[in-house]
Structure formats: C-alpha cells, structure tokens
Amino acid sequence: MNHSFTKTSYPTPEAIRAMQQQKLQELLAYIGQHSPFYRELFTTRHINIAAIQTPEDLVHLPVTGKEDLQQRNSDFLCVSRDKIIEYTATSGTVGSPVTIALTDNDLNRLAYNEYSSFSCADGSSTDVYQLMLTLDRQFMAGMAYYSGIRKLGAGIIRVGPGVPSLQWETIARLQPTAIVAVPSFIVKLIQYAQEHKIDINSSSVKKAVCIGENIRNTDFSMNVLGQKITNSWNIQLYSTYASTEMQTAFTECGAGKGGHHQPELVIVELLDDNHQPVAPGQPGEVTITTLGVEGMPLLRYQTGDICIGHYEPCSCGRHSLRLSPVIGRKKQMIKFKGTTLFLPALSDILNGMEDIRDFTVEVYANDIGTDEILLHLLPTHYSEETDRQIRAYLQAKLRVSPHIKYLTQEEMQRMQFPEGGRKPIKFVDKRARQNV
C-alpha cells in the first residue's frame, strides 16, 4: 500500500472543521455517559452539552487541569478495568505522575498517530530507525514510536537511552537511516565521535527525530542546541512535541516550520490566563480536547505548555495548525531579581557555552519568598579562569548572577537520573517541593 500523499490530498480547512465538529459531538456524548469526572462536572455546572456544537463553542466549558488528573485519576476512566490493555504514566515533569490507561482501540490510535508523525517527518518503509530512548517504565512515547514505525513498515533498532559507544557500534553494524533521540544526547554522540575519530558524516544516519527538547527558536531558526548538531553533523532534524495525556504528537515536516496538528486526533486551543483564545500570533497555553480516545478522554485539558499557533498553509501542502517550539511551561516560569525566565531560554544560554558540558537548573525560594537560581554545571575543564568566564558570561546574558555549583560527571549523572529515571532531570523546582 502506498501511504505517500500529494499536496491536493490533504484535507481542506472546511473538511477539517466539519470532521472535528462531528467528532467533538461524539466525544461529548461519550464522556457525558461514561466519564465519572465529566458527568459530575456537567451536572454540577448545569452544562447542556447539546449546546456545544463546534470547536469554537468549547470556550463555554470549564478547563481541566493537571491537578484534576492527579487528584481524581481513576474518575477519568471511561471503561471497565478488563478493557484496559496498557497502563502508562506521565514522567512527573511537573508534579506527581499521572496514570493514563489505554484500551486496544487507544493503542491502535496511538500507532496511527506516530505512523502519521513519522510519515510527516519524511519517513518511509525504506527507513531504519534507531531508538535511543526508554521503551519501559510506563513510557508511552517509546511504545508509540515503536508501534508507529512498525505501522510505517520501516525497520526498528531498540538500543535504549545513553551509552554513546553502543549507539555508534550499532550504527556501524546495522546501518540505520534515522535516529530518534533527545537533542542534548545527540550532542554527546557527536562529542564521543570526535573524541574517538568516528567520521559521523560518512555514517548511514541522514535524519533525526528530536524529542523532549527544543531545537528551534520561535521563528523556526535553529537554536544553539540545533546549531550544535547541524554544524557538526550533516543530518536533517525534525522536531516533535507531545504529552502522555493528549496521546498525540505534533511533528515537523521537511519545511521545519512547526509541529503539524493532527486534527482527526485532537482539538487544539491556545488560551490566555482567563481561558480565552489568544489572538493569532500570540503565545497561549496549549489546551487540548482528545478525539477518538476510549479509555481516558480529556476535554479542554491544559497542558501547561506555552506555544504560538501558525494557521497559514504549510509549503508541504497541509492546511492544519502548526505549533511553535514550546516557549516554556507555566509552572517552570522563574521570576529572578525582576527578570522573568523560562527554562528553554535559560537552557539556550547554557547550551551555547563551550565551557559547559551539561547542566541542571535548580530554583528555590529565598528568605523573602522570591526565586533564586542555582546552576549545577559540569564544566569542560574547571579552573578559576573558566569559573570567572562562566560567571561573566551569565551576568552579561541574564543581567543578574545566579548561584553556581560545579559537579563531576558522576554527580551530574546521579542528579539527572535518580533511581534510574527515564529522561534527564534538567529542572529541579524546590519552591513547591516539586522535581521536574
């Protein structure tokens, strides 16, 4: 079967709207009957779901937040336990983890989601993908990538996270065409290759699907992390954004102009602090309504991620919304000595410093209740002169001076991967006793 698309075969904005309208009404009827949480919400708020006809009407409904899922996790379940095939969990990036249960239909939907995502990222059945990520520990994404690539008909090499030597040995032996990895780990792959005289540009790898971290600025130019990769390695990078709760991904096409919305899987709103839609071009909180989810569907769920929406047609021919890189997470906003900082912006500064190999940002409240920043840094080579240069650079870039603590590679490893965590902890928030 040929899964390639021509530009004329993508649905028009009118077709997208009609399809979403129908799927939204199906969702409201379904959760009104099967979801204890939403059934109670509709009753106590005297909501007439029959009045909600279009995606624009969603503004009349209350939002759902991470706290609702944390406090009433099982009340979101719409099926009996014998219908659940897979129990996944959020990573606990903000607060305690949440269980997301999937039925057989949900697993098929998840496979379709990633099949569409990898197809969007110029994938085909002739590709071989090396997965440099966790496929256990209730991690939905690892399972989703695997099932999506399988549906695509491409080859899969499950190596798992870390261990650059094993990754390169596997690349040399099995000749993958693509890798799926966290961008900061791709930088470590490049460093290892340079130290061990591996000619990366003669390798079989021609593209990378980048997960978990931004590789672009909001204007879609490469940020420091993206530049570090592409300056050394002549590969095509594709960014992807997703969350466990939405069971859907936003993945770039070859144009690299934002993550493509899959309108048959989710309705997207970008909202301000009053839960109202932001004007086009303005940053707003990504708020999603899942379509076609059977086990734990969500209505107007606020992800906490701040993005900008792009609505003009893409050069690839798709008419769907595209999301900018994540500007920041609401709960990771730092007010430091009068300056507002989001983690991606701070990460960009630290990634751009040649003297720093790795970092974790810690935020805590001082005696007067305002934010303080402690940077845990792994220096390339420590000296008093290096320390002076790092502090001067941070002062110039931030206009304020954070506290700094230098770690060894072993200390950084223990801090970023406590008890075998599945992705590196780059942000520790001690203001609310939350680890991120």
Image (spheres, grey):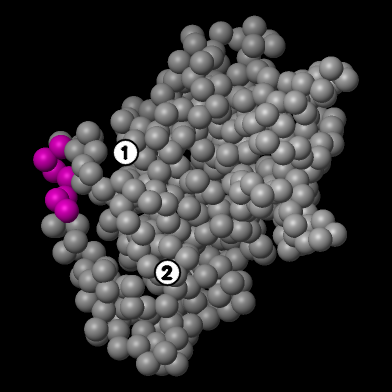
Whether residue 427 appears in this view of the structure is yes
**Secondary structure beneath label 2:** loop
Which one is closest to the eye, mark 2 or mark 1? 2
The magenta span reads: 7-13
Disc on res. 275: 2
**Which residue shows up at 56% across the image and 21% down it?**
228
Disc on res. 331: none
Task: Categorize mark 1 by other alpha carbons within 10 Å: few (<14), some (14-19), many (20+).
Answer: many
Q: Give residue 291's position: percent from left, percent from top.
A: 33, 65
Front residue of 107 and 140: 140
Location of mark 1 (residue): 120
Tell whether 138 sits left or right of 204: right
**Secondary structure beneath label 1:** helix
Q: Please tell me how many numbered marks the rendered image carries.
A: 2
Examine the rendered structure and indicate whether residue 315 appears above or below residue 70: above
Real-space CA distance between mark 2 and mark 1, rounded to the nearest whole angstrom: 31 Å
Which residue ends up furthest to the right in the rendered image? 384
Residue 216 is covered by the magenta coloring:
no
Examine the rendered structure and indicate whether residue 77 appears above or below residue 138: below
Residue 11 is covered by the magenta coloring:
yes
Tell whether 381 sits left or right of 12: right
